[in-house]
Amino acid sequence: MTARTNMTLHKVPLILISLLAVTITAKIAHADDTCSTFFWTGAAQGNVERYMPRYLIGEGLEDVGLERIGGTLIHHRWSTQAATCFASDNRNSYFMHPDFGQTSCRATERCFPGKRSRRMSERLADVLDVVGQLGVANADPTYQGNLNQAKTATYVFVDAMNNLRIAVADIYARLAGEYSNMITKINAALNPALPRSVRMTILDEICAPASIEVEEADRDRCVALGEDCELPSLLAVNNICTDRQNGASLETLVGRLADARNGLVTERGALISERDAILSLWGQIQGHR
């Protein structure tokens, strides 16, 4: 059992999401500073917090404090600026804004009441919602043209996500496979029909340094990819292994092994669901091209 095993898994550095976002938007042209502010006249201007899909159809002037100004021209100009800035590499574009990469922790999550990085499935669900909104036809030619422009830029961002998306889906599949292998071995170690010596040998296989190193490497890779990798049952097994290495007998570990096994089954289901969601959402996003 190494010191790294005891590190807190839920504290994923949110800066990783920002760095990944910068990487996957490298192909997108830099938006100039006009994206930060919407100008109507010198006396009528407002700062833009984050470009939203509804801005493409002239809505949201209240977000920049200009809802009091009437007329079609301001709505068209606002929509046209949004088309340029929506999926740019400006910090207040939809995908570069911090809210795309992070979210508030739910009360049931260990990180509550803080923030955590959004899982790939959560980001892809957001992208799917966006491309759905950008794909709704509009009778106004200006709005329709700006929707088309923003959608094209959004798919540049989507295409740049592909390698990261594949890597994340792969690590979830790898972890699920490791969980299945561990569950099978724990079941054997808990099987009273097997000779005690066989069960002890299996337990020692579970706790072999090489096995633990593989699991830790994949867990660390999951974190490095920006995922929120809470794997408490894996930590529970590693803690059992520490006690085994310190001389604990099989009999004293049976109860904890059974609890850890049950937790692993639940976590494996979550890992598989996450991988499946990534694959499904990606396919749906491609269907909106």
Image (cartoon, rainbow, N blue to C red):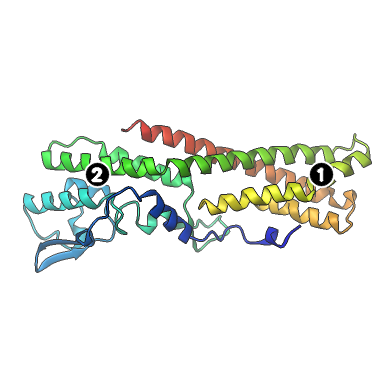
Task: Name which residue type carries label 2.
Answer: Ala
Q: Residue 205 carries which label?
A: 1
Query: Could you tell me how many numbered marks the image carries?
Result: 2
178 horizontally vs 52: left or right = right
Q: Distance between the residues labelled 2 and 1?
A: 54 Å
Query: Which percent across, then down, holds residue 192?
Result: 89, 38
41 horizontally vs 275: left or right = left
Q: Residue 153 carries which label?
A: none
Residue most extreme to the bottom:
43
- Could you tell me which residue is drawn at 47 percent across and 52 percent down? 118
Query: Which percent across, then down, holds residue 256?
Result: 79, 51
Residue 117 appears in the figure: yes
Res 151 quadrant in image:
top left
- Could you tell me which residue is drawn at 62 percent across and 61 percent down? 8
Res 47 quadrant in image:
bottom left
Residue most extreme to the top:
287
Query: Which percent across, then down, holds residue 115?
Result: 48, 61
> In the rendered image, which quarter contains the N terminus?
bottom right
Dot 1 falls on a residue whose secondary structure is: helix
Query: Which percent across, then down, holds residue 188?
Result: 82, 37
- Could you tell me which residue is drawn at 35 percent across and 50 percent down? 25
Res 150 quadrant in image:
top left
225 horizontally vs 211: left or right = left
